[in-house]
Amino acid sequence: MSESHANAPQKVIFEVLRYIPGVDAKPRMQSYEVPAPKGLTVLDGLLWIKENLDPTLSWRSSCRMGVCGSCAMFINGLPRLACANQVAHLHSDKIIIKPLPNYAIIRDLVPDLEPFFAKHAAIKPFLIRKNIEELDNPTGEFFQSKEELVNYIQFAYCIKCGACLSACPTVATDDAYLGPQALAQAWRYIADARDEGAAEREEEIFSAHGAFRCHFAGACSEVCPKGVDPAFAIQLMKQFMFKKKLGGCKEQHGSELAPPVENWVPKKEYPKAPEHSL
Ligand code: SF4
Ligand code: FES
C-alpha cells in the first residue's frame, strides 16, 4: 500500500437526528459522509459537517475537553460527551447521533435543559449556614480537613451535562422526579462538613418525586462521564436522611472558621523540599 493511500482518511457515516419543532412534522434522520482521520472526535465530525456540508445543523458545545458538559448527546445508543469520544473508539463505520433522551428537543441535537437546571436549583446547591453573617461578611475560611473533603469531592466533579437523567428509567416515567444529578448534588452539600442545610433540603428529598423514587437501577452511574456515581450518592443520602428522620443523627453543625494562615500550626513536621541542584 502506498504511503498516501495508507494516510488517506477513512470515511464514516454520521446519521444525525434533525428536528425543528413547528417546522418539521416529526424528527427525521439525515446521513452525512464524514472523513475520519485518526483522533477525530464525534464533535469534530459534527463541526466538519457544519463547515462543509450543512450549516443548519445545531447542537451545543463549548470547551471541547470534557469540562463544560454542554455536548452530551445520545451516540450509538448511549449518552456520551461528543468531545470526549473518538469515532475510532466507537468501533463502527456508522455513528448514530440523537439528542439526549428524556428531554424535549429545542432543535436537532439541542435538548431543553430548563427542567434539569430547575431541579438542580431546587435542592439549593450551595453551602447553607444557620448563621449567615459569616457568609455575608466573611472574615476567614470555614475549616475543612482532608478527610472531610473526601466525603464529598467525588460528587463535586459533576459538570451538569444531563447524561444521567437521560439514562434514568425513573425519569423516563416521572417528569417531576428530581433525578440523579440534583439528588447527588443535594448529598454533595449535605456531606460537606461546612454545610448545615440538610433540614432545608428535606422537603425536596422526601417529596413524592425525591430520593425515595430512586429504584437504584444504576444507569446514571454507568453513563456519567466524570465518575460521579450519582446512584451511590443517592443511597448514601437515603441512609443519612432516614436515620436523621428517626433521630439517629446528630444535629448538623457546620465547621468553624479556620485559624488565619499565619497562626496555623501544622500537626506534624513536613519534610523540607530538597535544595535546587543548579
Ligand atoms: S452526575 Fe455525571 S452524568 Fe449526571 S450531570 Fe453530573 S457529570 Fe453529567
Ligand atoms: S464541549 Fe465541553 S464537555 Fe464537550
Image (tube, rainbow, N blue to C red):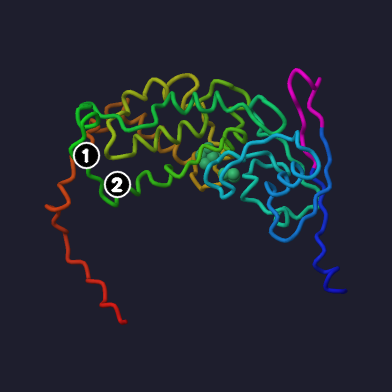
> Seen in the image, is 185 located left or right of residue 2?
left
Mark yes or no: residue 191 visible: yes
Q: Position of residue 223 (x, y in %)?
A: 59, 43
The residue identified by callout 2 is 148
> Separation of disc 2 and disc 1 at Cα?
10 Å
What residue sits 64% from the left and 40% below the top?
A: 79
Q: Are marks 2 and 1 in contact (CB under 8 Å)?
A: yes
Residue 63 drawn at (x, y percent): 56, 45
Amino acid at the residue labelled 2:
Glu
Which mark, residue 209?
none
Name the residue at 72% across, 31% down. 108
Q: Residue furthest right?
A: 1
Magenta span: chief secondary structure = loop
What span is colored magenta in the figure? 15-28
Q: Is residue 229 left or right of residue 126?
A: right
Under tag 2, what secondary structure? helix
Residues packed near mark 1 inside 10 Å, few (<14), some (14 to 19) or many (20 plus) = some
Residue 194: percent from left, percent from top: 27, 38
Q: Nearer the viewer, residue 86 or 227?
A: 86
Q: Is residue 89 above or below residue 58?
A: below
Label placed on residue 255 = 1
Q: Say if residue 222 shows up in the picture.
A: no
Q: In which image quadrant can residue 86 be found?
A: bottom right
